[in-house]
Image (cartoon, helix red, strand yellow):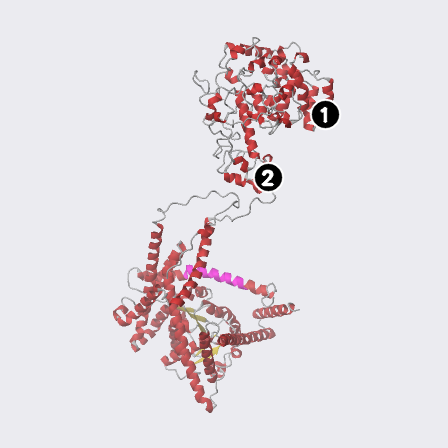
């Protein structure tokens, strides 16, 4: 019973959703929508549970001074501040006593997002550029084969193909880049997408018929 | 015999070493009997006597004439027939000799009775030997001519005509005949202890020279024989005297089955079982051996192995010292004895076989010798007898090709039982070794990195990778260069992109044909990290829509995407003068949880998925321009701004097919190949695509927004040259790195390898495992040095 009940629920819900997708009529469509709403709510709760778990883990680190507890302290402070600003900014505008607090919270929340989160993430992406360039320069030291040479040549063509330079040889690079992206790359991706689709269908059918039970033991 | 021509002066063939002239013992003329009886020592082979018809061989001619007068039944049989199979030959010869020398009535009644009483106890194969003996006399054709001669010369085959030693020998020989061990050659021409009892032809063979010790056969104890011995044999028993040293290897003597009359002796010797007591060589035969042959000094040269018999002249060179002095039948007998000695060595344990003995001066293993190599001896399974090996099998492959008596790998592998040695290591190929070395290097680098980090923590060493720092500084400098050197941003050198790809053209067309009364949904599926690449395209799209009066609703399935959407909307609204028209011209629907499930829910019932907008101004669906939206298909267009292809694919697979709403995308350049098939499909699921900043700039130029921005802020016009120079610098650094890496690889390959001597080549691995102690090669190799950073 412990194993059969989850399996029966999963198989029945999966088959029902699949049938309702292809036959969206009457109660089937409503039932499918209901199931999807439940799933979305569960996903939102799962996100909250994940955030709470993250806060508890770092709170435990901070309480025992284990590991890099300074980082845990920074995370918890940022978490509390942003959560507080976010919640305070939701104060209805009708409450005049808290209108200033709500305005300040909204401004602070926007400021933290615009002037802290966006620059930090952009800086990390900029570091990725440097790492990628260095890795490309070192590629032949790590892999001494023709695949590495081809990789470097194609990457140079695509990289320089974005730029329009009025030089004799480099003028042809945008056209060559466009051909590579639309012919060989697109052809290879088509095969990749077909494989992914077949694999997804197979996995879904295995779950529906009970061959795979990711929800149980 | 090679049948090649030789000069008349040669006694031995210069090509094959065969004797060309009949061999005559010293003093043979003096002892040649007047009755022209054949002498075994002077018995030439037919091939050797054919070219030389000397008067001394007239007696042979007469013998042939007498032989032709014999009954047809006997002469019709080929004379070499008994020698076709050596093993039963000995018994046949013995029975034939007994039958001829003594007629069927010759055995005395007690002897017959004894034979009949033993008949029931004999095995079948021995009965098969006895059966023809009882039915008919032994065929005379199986008897050599020189033995038939006394039979023919006798007036009547009576027992009385036999010499005494033969009469005393007949009964024991008959009783000993069933035993294979006694069926060897020594019992055939049994010499008498006294010269007076010998026939004349045998007297001629007993030279007055002192008899050499019969060393080759005295290694086997004579007491082991079950057959009764004659008086003359008993007299040959050792009387307390130390046994002579074992015989030298006589395997170098060439074995020629030339059909000689005396070849039966060689065949008998070849079939002689090992360890049999009947291997005792009589004195008369030992007397025929040249003096000094049995001493170790007489055989100084290494002798080839008897199993590896070769008639090549160079292999028989060590025996040339006495090859001319020995008759052929003795040479063949010696070769057979060498084969027996080799079989004995193969049967002995490897340690005993490989141990040098005083009588074996050539104890060192060498190719073609009888001694197996040490590595071959190591492969021998202990306890494996010689009877389990096929000594006559010739190796057909591998380094032992052409050798016989080699321990076969199959027999070792197929043995069932306790292995002789434990498995030391697996046999790995070079490729596997390289892969293992790479894996070990990776592990060692991990440990060394941790150790280096620990040391850095203690010593406060500066371990920042310099090359990355230089690359970062170079890219930063190049990106800032247009701002300090406007000449680099010249449109003549770096013109802004103006060409529109088909996908971008489709995007422009789709946005240009949108109805004004229907809102457009823009999905922000990217985080602030990708805002630098995607925001230009999104801004261009939003401004175009807002300028056209199309209302925009934003949504995101990423928590951080909501903030990005709000920033983009605010910026576009500020650019178009609609900053204060939130909720009227644009709205942020906020975060959509659930991933692809949330997308399906939103596509089917958006009003149930989103209850409040981002600014918490109430239900967005209460807005007049959103009131009629009950499904995604109620939007005129869905624009997905995605940093990854998966995010765009979620919209393309979960929303577009079920609703049929037109869908366009603004994606990063990395996602372009994955999204292009959706644009190329028929009908296209993707109406248009803007990939990367390059196409966003082209789209800006196409809509005229770029010129507008440049006129408003000249610094904005420098963004594209800065981006283009950064791309050029990146490509140049990668190209330089590839060239330098190639040069370093070539410089590493060239030198030192030739200066260092090559390591000794390992012996070939036999089987799956190596036995014996192995060197820990992998552990002895020094660890690879960690790369300097």
Residue B119, numbered label: 1
Q: Visible in this render: residue A192?
A: yes
User: The residue tagged with tag 1: helix, strand or loop?
Assistant: helix
- Judged left or right of residue B356, residue B158 is right
Image spot of residue B446 (x, y percent): 44, 61
Q: How many marks are shown on the rendered structure?
A: 2
Name the residue at 51% across, 13% down.
Answer: B27
Q: Find disc 2 in the rendering and name its residue.
A: B383
Mark 2 secondary-structure assignment: loop
Q: Are marks 1 and 2 in contact (CB under 8 Å)?
A: no
Q: Answer yes or no: is residue B100 visible.
A: no
* Predominant SS of the magenta segment: helix
The image quadrant where one finds the C terminus of chain B is bottom left
Residue at x 52%, y 27% (from the top left corner): B248
| Residue situated in front as seen by the camera: B379 or B47 | B379
Disc 2: which chain? B
In this picture, is B130 found above or below B26? below
Q: Bounds of the magenta span?
A: A182-200
Q: Does the magenta stretch include residue A198?
A: yes
Q: Is residue A25 placed above or below B341 in the rendered structure?
A: below
Residue neighbourhood size for the residue with mark 2, other residues' Cα within 10 Å, grouped as few (<14), some (14–19), many (≥20): few
Which one is in front, B189 or B717? B189
Residue placed most toward the observer, B257 or A40: B257
Question: Which quarter of the picture shows residue B489?
Answer: bottom left
Q: Is residue B487 toward the left or the right of residue B534 in the image? A: left
Q: Locate residue A148, reporting x and y percent.
A: 39, 57
Q: Is B29 rendered above or below residue B432?
A: above
* Residue B149 pos. (x, y %): 60, 13
Q: Quadrant of residue B455?
A: bottom left
Q: Is B262 placed left or right of A71 in the picture?
A: right
């Amino acid at each position: 019973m412990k194993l059969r009940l989850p399996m029966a629920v999963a198989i029945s819900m999966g088959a029902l959703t699949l049938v309702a997708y292809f036959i969206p009529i009457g109660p089937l469509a409503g039932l499918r929508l209901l199931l999807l709403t439940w799933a979305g709510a569960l996903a939102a709760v799962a996100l909250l549970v994940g955030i709470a778990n993250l806060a508890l883990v770092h709170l435990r680190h901070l309480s025992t001074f284990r590991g890099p507890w300074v980082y845990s302290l920074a995370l918890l402070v940022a978490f509390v501040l942003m959560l507080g600003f976010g919640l305070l900014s939701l104060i209805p505008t009708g409450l005049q006593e808290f209108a200033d607090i709500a305005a300040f919270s909204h401004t602070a929340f926007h400021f933290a997002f615009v002037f802290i989160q966006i620059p930090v993430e952009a800086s990390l992406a900029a570091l990725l550029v440097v790492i990628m360039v260095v890795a490309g320069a070192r590629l032949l030291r790590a892999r001494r084969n023709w695949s590495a040479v081809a990789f470097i040549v194609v990457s140079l063509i695509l990289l320089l193909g974005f730029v329009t330079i009025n030089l004799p040889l480099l003028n042809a690079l945008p056209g060559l880049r466009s051909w590579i992206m639309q012919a060989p790359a697109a052809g290879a991706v088509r095969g990749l997408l077909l494989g992914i689709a077949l694999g997804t269908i197979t996995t879904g059918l295995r779950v529906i018929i009970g061959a795979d039970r990711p929800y149980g033991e | 015999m090679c049948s090649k021509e030789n000069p008349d002066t040669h006694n031995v063939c210069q090509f094959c070493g065969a004797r060309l002239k009949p061999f005559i013992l010293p003093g043979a003329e003096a002892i040649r009997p007047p009755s022209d009886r054949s002498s075994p020592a002077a018995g030439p082979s037919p091939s050797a006597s054919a070219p030389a018809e000397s008067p001394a061989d007239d007696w042979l001619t007469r013998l042939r004439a007498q032989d032709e007068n014999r009954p047809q039944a006997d002469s019709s049989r080929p004379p070499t027939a008994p020698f076709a199979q050596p093993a039963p030959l000995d018994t046949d010869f013995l029975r034939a000799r007994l039958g001829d020398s003594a007629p069927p009535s010759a055995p005395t009644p007690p002897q017959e009775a004894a034979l009949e009483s033993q008949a029931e106890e004999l095995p079948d194969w021995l009965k098969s030997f006895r059966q023809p003996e009882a039915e008919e006399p032994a065929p005379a054709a199986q008897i050599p001519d020189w033995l038939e001669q006394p039979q023919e010369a006798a007036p009547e085959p009576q027992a009385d005509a036999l010499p005494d030693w033969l009469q005393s020998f007949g009964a024991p020989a008959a009783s000993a005949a069933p035993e294979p061990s006694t069926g060897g050659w020594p019992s055939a021409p049994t010499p008498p202890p006294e010269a007076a009892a010998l026939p004349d032809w045998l007297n001629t063979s007993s030279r007055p020279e002192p008899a050499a010790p019969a060393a080759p056969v005295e290694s086997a104890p004579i007491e082991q024989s079950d057959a009764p011995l004659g008086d003359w044999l008993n007299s040959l028993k050792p009387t307390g005297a130390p046994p002579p040293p074992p015989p030298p290897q006589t395997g170098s003597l060439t074995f020629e089955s030339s059909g000689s009359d005396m070849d039966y002796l060689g065949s008998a010797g070849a079939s002689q079982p090992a360890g049999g007591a009947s291997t005792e060589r009589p004195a008369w035969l030992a007397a025929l051996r040249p003096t000094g042959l049995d001493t170790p000094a007489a055989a100084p040269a290494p002798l080839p192995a008897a199993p590896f018999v070769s008639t090549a002249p160079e292999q028989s060179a060590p025996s040339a010292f006495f090859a001319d002095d020995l008759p052929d039948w003795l040479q063949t007998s010696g070769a057979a004895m060498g084969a027996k000695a080799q079989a004995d060595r193969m049967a002995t344990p490897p340690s005993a076989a490989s141990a040098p003995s005083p009588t074996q001066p050539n104890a060192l293993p060498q190719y073609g010798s009888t001694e197996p190599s040490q590595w071959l001896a190591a492969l021998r399974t202990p306890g494996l007898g010689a009877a389990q090996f096929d000594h006559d099998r010739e190796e057909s492959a591998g380094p032992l090709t052409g050798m016989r008596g080699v321990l076969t790998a199959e027999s070792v592998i197929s043995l069932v039982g306790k292995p002789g040695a434990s498995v030391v290591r697996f046999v790995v190929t070079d490729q596997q070794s390289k892969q293992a070395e790479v894996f070990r290097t990776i592990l060692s680098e991990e440990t060394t990195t941790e150790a280096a980090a620990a040391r850095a923590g203690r010593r406060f060493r500066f371990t920042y990778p310099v090359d990355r720092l230089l690359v970062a500084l170079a890219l930063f400098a190049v990106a800032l260069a247009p701002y300090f050197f406007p000449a680099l941003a010249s449109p003549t050198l770096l013109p802004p992109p103006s060409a529109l790809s088909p996908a971008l053209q489709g995007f422009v067309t789709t946005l240009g044909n949108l109805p004004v009364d229907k809102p457009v949904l823009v999905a922000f599926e990217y985080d602030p990290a990708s805002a630098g690449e995607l925001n230009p395209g999104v801004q261009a799209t939003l401004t175009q829509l807002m300028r056209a009066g199309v209302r925009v609703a934003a949504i995101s399935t990423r928590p951080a995407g909501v903030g990005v959407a709000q920033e983009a909307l605010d910026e576009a609204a500020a650019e178009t003068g609609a900053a204060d028209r939130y909720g009227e011209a644009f709205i942020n629907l906020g975060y959509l949880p659930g991933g692809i499930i949330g997308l399906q829910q939103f596509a089917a019932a958006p009003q149930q998925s989103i209850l409040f907008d981002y600014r918490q101004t109430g239900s967005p669906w209460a807005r007049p321009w959103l009131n009629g939206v009950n499904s995604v298909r109620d939007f005129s267009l869905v624009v997905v701004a995605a940093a990854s292809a998966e995010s765009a694919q979620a919209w393309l697979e979960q929303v577009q097919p079920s609703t049929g709403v037109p869908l366009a995308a603004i994606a990063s350049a990395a996602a372009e190949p994955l999204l292009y098939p959706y644009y190329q499909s028929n009908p296209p699921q993707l109406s248009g695509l803007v990939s990367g900043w390059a196409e966003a700039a082209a789209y800006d130029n196409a809509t005229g927004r770029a010129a507008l921005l440049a006129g408003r802020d000249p610094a904005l016009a420098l963004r594209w040259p800065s981006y283009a120079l950064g791309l050029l610098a990146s490509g140049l650094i990668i190209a330089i790195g590839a060239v330098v890496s190639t040069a370093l690889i070539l410089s590493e390959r060239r030198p030192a390898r030739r200066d260092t001597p090559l390591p000794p080549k390992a012996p070939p691995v036999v089987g799956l495992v190596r036995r014996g102690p192995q060197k820990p090669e992998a552990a002895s190799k020094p660890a690879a040095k960690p790369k300097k950073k």
